[in-house]
């Protein structure tokens, strides 16, 4: 009786579907060798392409209704105005909730540019004024306490610098029309400093924070003040008067930036027809969410944009709220109710192995069919040649 191990091996041997042909009954041909080489190269190439596809991360977009509520949004901007001095410019925001913010330079860096576009340096107006210290005592020998000239004084009750007086006027809602009559501004050379930037340009770079509702932000010449709950924008005679709003938008984005983001206004450059030219850009912001393959999520925004240029040479600039006749740069933004979700995906290892096996088996099957056809054709031709010789 055969041992148990031999019986088990015999059973497995009976399950072999890959019956082997003895070498004595196989024939190797030149065409078969060529087909085998070609098939092997093809397998290597196809498996390599499949491996590259397996390593590649695909981004699948999905459009959904935006149910998220983000109270604030960053607007990242980098704008060069080669013919508008830094000291002249104001930056304000107005939104559909009737909230307006003026002089938003807390997170904006202003760089002075020469007439030929070269960097002069940062606009450090406030720093330069602070270097001129007010006197320690007044004419009577008492500790110096500068007048606020009717403006709302700070907590100290004294306006010792020109900027203190300016802020006191702003709190009162008054226009800062005559700094030459104020001893602090005369001492610091306020008007002289402004006029010194005539003919220069400015680059504004940084971000502003706004409510995520429809609205606009604008860059104008002059100053915006709040008076009686209203916004008044005015231009002072002592400000540089040689300017226009020719500009280049180096970059403009809403929210955090990501690698595949496309900003349609990046690189846009416009030349003003006159000092009164107004540029309007209308943007529609679509919320975006990028779900990375490592599980992290980035919330950002994308936008589309159109533009309009107006030349208001026939209109007068007066102290009023910014309107369609006010020269400057206006960026209107509207919030879309839709959100685009981008999800990073990658093929699984099982998918790659399945595809690789399919490639190997498929190529060898096709190659065997081709080899069989070529072999039979060769034998048929050989028989014909032998019959021809016998005849």
Image (tube, helix red, strand yellow):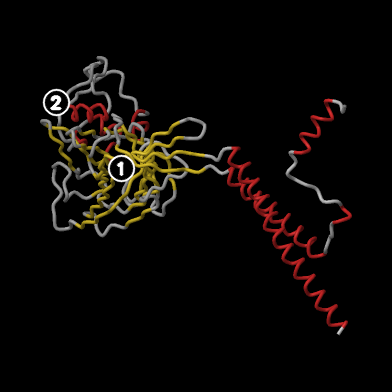
Residue beneath label 2, please?
A: 150
- Dot 2, how many residues are within 10 Å of its Cα: few (below 14), some (14-19), or many (20+)? few
Pick whichever, 379 or 133, lies toward us.
379
Which label sits in the foreground, 1 or 2? 1
Tag shown at residue 40: none
Tag shown at residue 285: 1
Q: Is residue 27 above or below residue 176?
A: below
- Dot 1, how many residues are within 10 Å of its Cα: few (below 14), some (14-19), or many (20+)? many
Q: Is residue 2 visible?
A: yes
User: Residue 252, percent across and down?
Assistant: 36, 44
Left or right for 185, reference 79:
left
| Residue drawn at (28%, 27%) of the image | 161
Q: Is residue 109 visible?
A: no
User: Residue 42, percent across and down?
Assistant: 69, 56
Pick whichever, 278 or 266, lies toward us.
266
Indicate the quadrant containing the C terminus: top left, top right, bottom left or bottom right.
bottom right
């Amino acid at each position: 009786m055969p041992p148990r191990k031999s019986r088990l091996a015999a059973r497995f041997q009976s399950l072999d579907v890959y019956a082997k042909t003895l070498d004595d009954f196989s024939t190797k041909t030149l065409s078969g060798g060529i087909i085998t080489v070609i098939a092997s190269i093809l397998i290597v190439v196809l498996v390599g392409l499949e491996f590259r596809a397996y390593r590649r991360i695909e981004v699948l977009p999905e459009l959904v209704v935006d149910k998220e509520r983000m109270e604030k949004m960053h607007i990242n901007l980098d704008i060069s105005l080669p013919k508008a001095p830094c000291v002249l410019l104001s930056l304000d925001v107005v939104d559909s909730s009737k909230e307006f913010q003026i002089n938003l330079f807390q997170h904006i860096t202003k760089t002075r540019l020469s007439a030929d576009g070269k960097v002069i340096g940062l606009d450090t107006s406030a720093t330069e004024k602070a270097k001129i210290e007010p006197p320690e005592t007044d004419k009577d020998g008492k500790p110096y306490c500068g007048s606020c000239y009717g403006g709302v004084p700070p907590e100290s009750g004294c306006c010792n610098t020109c900027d203190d007086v300016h802020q006191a006027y702003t709190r009162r809602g008054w226009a800062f029309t005559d700094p030459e009559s104020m001893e602090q501004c005369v001492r610091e050379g306020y008007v002289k400093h402004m006029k010194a930037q005539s003919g220069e340009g400015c680059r504004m770079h940084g971000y502003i924070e706004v409510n995520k509702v429809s609205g606009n932000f604008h860059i104008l010449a002059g100053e915006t003040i709040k008076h009686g709950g209203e916004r008044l924008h005015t231009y002072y005679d002592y400000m540089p008067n040689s300017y226009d709003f020719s500009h280049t938008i180096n970059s403009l984005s809403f929210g955090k930036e990501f690698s595949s983001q496309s900003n349609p206004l990046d690189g846009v450059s416009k030349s003003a027809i006159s000092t009164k030219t107004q540029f309007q850009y209308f943007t529609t912001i679509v919320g975006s969410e990028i779900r990375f393959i490592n599980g992290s999520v980035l919330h950002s925004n994308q936008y589309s944009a159109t533009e309009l240029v107006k030349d208001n040479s026939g209109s007068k600039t007066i102290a009023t709220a910014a309107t369609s006749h006010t020269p400057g740069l206006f960026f209107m933004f509207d919030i879309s109710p839709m959100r685009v979700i981008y999800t990073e995906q990658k093929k699984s290892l099982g998918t790659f192995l399945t595809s690789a096996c399919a490639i190997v088996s498929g190529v060898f099957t096709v190659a065997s069919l081709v080899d069989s056809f070529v072999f039979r054709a060769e034998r048929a031709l050989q028989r014909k040649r032998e019959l021809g010789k016998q005849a």
